[in-house]
Image (cartoon, rainbow, N blue to C red):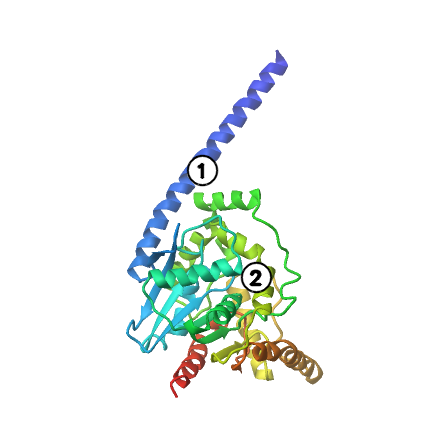
Amino acid sequence: MKAQKIMRGIGKVLLILLAVAVLCTLVTFVVHRIKTRKEITLLKEQGYYHPVSVGEYCLNAARFGNESGRHTIVGLAGNGMGDFSVAARQMTACLETDNQVVFIDRAGYGFSDDTEQEMTLAYIVEDYRKALKSAEIDAPYILMAHSIGGAYANYWASKYPEEIEAVVLVDGSQLSGDAFDDWEESEVEIGDRFLAMLAKLGVSRYVLRDYFYHYPDNYSQDEQALGDALTLMTLDSIAPISESARLAENAQQAFEEIVTNDIPKLYICASWGMESEEDILENNKWINRQIEINNMDINPRPLEYDEETLKEILDRFQKARETTIYPYAEKMGNCKVVCLGGDHMIYEQNPEECGRIIKEFIDGLEG
């Protein structure tokens, strides 16, 4: 009898805990849906919502600037960067007066629909092309790619050169035959699907900062809210997980299939672009500020160096450019490398200078 009473007591406690968990999940979901509706309304008002069909699902193709402008610039995000259309707008501000700027979100990013399709290099590029065709945005295009977006831009320019007017790589991933060999690859697993489900329920709002840092000080609260909203929409998707699982495969294939051609190209070298002590110290100050505002458990960067250490650092950057960046640019063909030392997210760190460099390059296409 005593054992039965104990078991009944344990059962009641477990039922109570289950009821509390269900109630908390329900409240979280309802609050998440209410906030999401408000965020979607705000994003639509700001022009970030423009889904177009690519067949069985839609991709978002947000259009800004001058639709009758001289060029069509197509923004290609880095890995998992569902907020690229928001975060890159400071960089493209100076480009939008005379050009149309289109940000196409890959499957599962932001407003784009999710899919179970394998995110291979060819599949992603074909999705981009279908989206532009569906949106009735005609070639030629200037591809403006960040990070791994550069792999997709290279594949596109090599396979369909008649569609591409120019390519701009904003600290594009340094492709090579063994790019991302140390990347831990895996297929989409049950755990990934569980986390995506939790994100759909709204749990991702509690851990957002673990996946997505605050923007730098030059961004407004409204921009932060828009970027957060698009990131939350990305965290509940499967396609970006599939894409990330194929990061090395896609990068290496893109490198191997580069067709050297005369399409004008610009490579903005940030991560390996330090050329002076001033570059290093300014970048360290910026990183230290990011550590501060994001409460990172990371030691701050030094703000002074002895002569020997400084030389070692600058030599390392120079060697990286000579062994990786310049050979990569040569393989692409007709590629100008411009050093703008800074963080990999250089379009957030120094958007005005990035925009100026890109504008000067585009203006030169007409010369």
Which quarter of the image is occupied by the C terminus?
Answer: bottom left
Residue reaching furthest to the bottom: 367
Left/right placement of residue 262 relative to residue 327 reads: left
Q: x and y percent of residue 339 in the render?
A: 54, 81
Left/right placement of residue 186 relative to residue 76 reads: right
The answer to whether any part of residue 219 appears in the image is yes
Q: Residues within 10 Å of mark 2 (few under 14, many from 20)?
A: many
What's under tag 2, amino acid-wise?
Asn
For image coordinates 31% across by 58% down, the residue present is 44
Q: x and y percent of residue 363 in the render?
A: 39, 84
Query: Mark number for residue 24?
Result: 1
341 in relation to 86, above or below: below
The answer to whether any part of residue 350 appears in the image is no
Q: Residues within 10 Å of mark 1 (few under 14, many from 20)?
A: few
For image coordinates 48% across by 71% down, the residue present is 157
300 in relation to 278, above or below: above
Q: x and y percent of residue 326 in the render?
A: 60, 80
Residue underneath mark 2: 250
Helix, strand or loop for disc 1: helix
Q: x and y percent of residue 174 in the render?
A: 59, 71
Compute the Cα span from label 1 to label 2: 41 Å
What's under tag 1, amino acid-wise?
Cys
Which quarter of the image is occupied by the N terminus?
Answer: top right
198 in relation to 359, above or below: above
